[in-house]
């Protein structure tokens, strides 16, 4: 298995799940956002996915027969300010990986996609049949690859599954891996940091048409995501049936709910201030993951927000400075 972006948050958890399931893992990452210390399972190759020759060489030298592609940029706000950066890394980079696969006859691909490909939802929960109309270049960059996949499958005999994650959260329950983004853009680690006396949390808007006025999101534990990847790979190898699957719990939580969970788990207040709504933030995003349950046999094992926050909190306490500290 070649795991691009395997030194990052979700990829490192997936590498662990793959190794535990008996797969041989090779992590390929340029460490632009990842951490060498996060590669605890499998061999590490430092390289850039835009370097097709380097990706090919990693595949050939390790007799790779499948790829999980996590390497990408993922900050929605940044993608609005710097679309070129997102098209280059997320579109050109992914096409480079697919080109290397075609050249090396690697035919199995699991792709990190996102609920951002749906854009503003017209109905919730969101099923895989919901129209995909992204409202930022991040979502567009992922959708461009989803749309390319059927053509690559037909022409090069590949088979691919796209996994559309909702909000990845939490940390390895065994405490080996966790979230270490810089800057941190996700609400749970930010709320945890705020509870410890860091900068207060900003809540973007409290006048949405939701029960408490703050946005509703679907938080899915990172180890449950990792488990879904292993299942997707195994189903793909067995059935050769391409497809796309939502990965979420289907249980939406508001920003106020997240603050409440962090306060319960840490026993500390989360100071927060109200900030204006952010452009392009839908009021509610949550998944129907029925297809993944039915076809991948996947069920989230840590669906509760308190359980998710507990693992994130344990990681933060053990690693206050992230992997470096
Ligand atoms: N975190 C979420 O909530 C979320 C939600 C939906 C989808 N996703 C997708 O999941 C994937 C992983 O997200 P994450 O949260 O683990 O992000 P991350 O930033 O922690 O991990 C991405 C990894 O890819 C590496 N990388 C980036 N560009 C590279 C390049 N050109 N060559 C080699 N390596 C490169 C980075 O160094 C990093 O280790 C991304 O594709 C993201 O779009 C994440």
Image (spheres, rainbow, N blue to C red):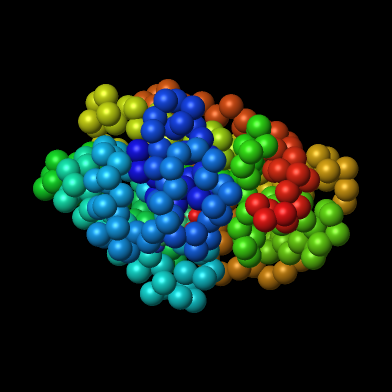
Percent across and percent down for residue 239 are: 25, 26
In the picture, residue 242 is in which quadrant?
Answer: top left
Give x and y (percent) for residue 23. Answer: 39, 30
For this view, does 281 lie left or right of residue 255? Answer: left
Q: Nearer the viewer, residue 6 or 269?
A: 6
- Assign the C terminus to one quadrant of the image: bottom right
Q: Residue at x 83, y 40 (%)?
A: 264
Front residue of this view, candidates 21 and 276: 21
Q: Is residue 28 left or right of residue 103?
A: right
What residue occupies the far right of the structure in this picture? Answer: 268
In this view, 305 is above or below 132: above
Front residue (pair 117, 75): 75
Q: Given the current orientation, which residue lies at the most extreme front position? A: 61
Q: Quadrant of residue 292?
A: top left
| Image quarter in which the N terminus is found | top left
Residue drawn at the location 23% of the way across and 31% of the way down: 240
Residue occupying the far left of the picture: 155
Q: How many labels sit on residues?
A: 0
Q: Inspect this view and state whether residue 169 appears.
A: yes
Q: Residue at x 61, y 58 (%)?
A: 181
Q: Is residue 19 left or right of residue 254?
A: left
The x, y position of residue 205, in whole percent, is: 69, 63
- Can residue 119 be seen here? no
Q: Depth check: 69 or 282 in front?
A: 69
In-image side of 196 versus 307 (left or right)? right
Q: Which percent across, then down, holds residue 266?
A: 83, 43
């Amino acid at each position: 298995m070649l795991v691009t972006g395997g030194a990052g948050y979700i990829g490192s958890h997936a590498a662990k799940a793959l190794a535990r399931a008996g797969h041989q893992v090779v992590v390929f990452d340029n460490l632009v956002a990842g951490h060498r210390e996060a590669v605890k399972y499998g061999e590490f190759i430092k390289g850039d996915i835009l370097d097709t020759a380097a990706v090919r060489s990693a595949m050939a030298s390790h007799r790779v027969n499948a790829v999980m592609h996590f390497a990408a940029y993922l900050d929605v706000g940044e993608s609005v300010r710097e679309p070129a950066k997102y098209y280059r890394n997320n579109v050109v980079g992914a096409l480079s990986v697919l080109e290397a696969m075609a050249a090396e006859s690697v035919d199995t691909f699991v792709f990190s996609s996102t609920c951002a490909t749906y854009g503003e939802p017209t109905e919730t929960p969101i099923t895989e049949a919901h129209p995909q109309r992204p409202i930022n270049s991040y979502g567009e960059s992922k959708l461009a690859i989803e749309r390319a996949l059927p053509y690559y499958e037909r022409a090069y005999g590949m088979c691919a599954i796209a996994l559309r994650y909702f909000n990845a959260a939490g940390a390895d329950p065994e405490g080996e891996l966790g979230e270490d983004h810089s800057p941190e853009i996700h609400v749970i680690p930010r709320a945890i940091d705020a509870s410890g006396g860091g900068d207060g949390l900003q809540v973007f808007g409290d006048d949405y048409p939701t029960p408490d006025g703050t946005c509703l999101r679907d938080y899915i534990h990172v180890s449950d995501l990792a488990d879904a990847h292993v299942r997707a790979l195994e189903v793909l190898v067995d059935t050769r049936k391409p497809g796309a699957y939502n990965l979420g719990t289907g249980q939406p939580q508001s920003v106020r709910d997240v603050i409440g969970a962090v306060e319960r788990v840490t026993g500390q207040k989360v100071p927060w201030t109200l900030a204006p709504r952010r452009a392009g933030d839908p009021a509610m995003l949550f998944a129907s993951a029925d297809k993944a349950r039915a076809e991948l046999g996947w069920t989230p094992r840590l669906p509760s927000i308190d359980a998710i926050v507990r693992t994130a909190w344990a990681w933060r306490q053990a690693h206050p400075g992230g992997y470096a500290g």
